[in-house]
Amino acid sequence: QVQLVESGGGLVQPGGSLRLSCAASGRIFSINAMGWYRQAPGKQRELVAAITRGGSKNYADSVKDRFTISRDNAKNTVYLQMNSLKPEDTGVYYCNADIAVAALSKEYWGQGTQVTVSS
């Protein structure tokens, strides 16, 4: 069974920083793309950032130049460094990964971690 476990959320003042981590565990053959999504109250879940196994990255326009996604393939872990946080970054952040178990790939989600940006 594959699990994604996030950590690093919390309460931070505007302009502050947080670093999210997401570790995949279980009977993993390989991990393809990994990413972070967020969902604000009353809004749809949206892509924040994604990274391929080879390191290619893409970001939502709203977080470019403030957030950085990275991954450690040896540790099956993806990170999201969030700087210059704004109140509109508030939401539940979910880790997402395309994981191959044996010959089949499947999309997995973490349980979510709350990020609140407020003074």
Image: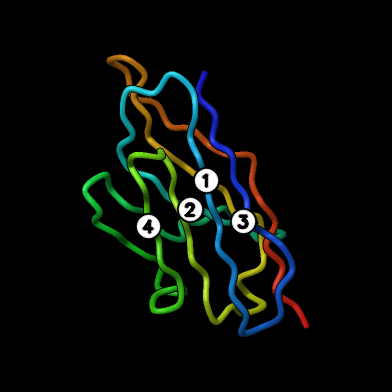
Q: Name the residue that disc number 3 marks.
A: 39
Q: Amino acid at mark 1?
A: Cys
Above or below — where is 107 with respect to 87? above
Q: Which label sits in the foreground, 2 or 1?
A: 1
Q: Residue at x 61, y 85 (%)?
A: 15
| Marks 3 and 4 in Cβ contact (< 8 Å) | no
Q: Name the residue that disc number 1 marks.
A: 22
* Helix, strand or loop for disc 2: strand
| Marks 4 and 2 in Cβ contact (< 8 Å) | no
Q: Residue at x 62, y 50 (%)?
A: 7
Q: CA distance from mark 3 to mark 1?
A: 17 Å
| Marks 2 and 1 in Cβ contact (< 8 Å) | yes
Q: CA distance from mark 2 to mark 3?
A: 10 Å
* Helix, strand or loop for disc 1: strand
Q: Name the residue that disc number 4 marks.
A: 70
Position of residue 87 in the picture relative to residue 110 (left or right): right
| Marks 2 and 3 in Cβ contact (< 8 Å) | no
Of pointers 3 and 4, the one earlier in the residue sequence: 3
Q: Amino acid at mark 4?
A: Ser
Rendered location of residue 51, percent (x, y): 32, 52
Q: Name the residue that disc number 2 marks.
A: 36
Position of residue 118 in the picture relative to residue 16 (left or right): right
Q: Amino acid at mark 2?
A: Trp
Q: Residue furthest front?
A: 74
Q: Residue at x 70, y 59 (%)?
A: 42
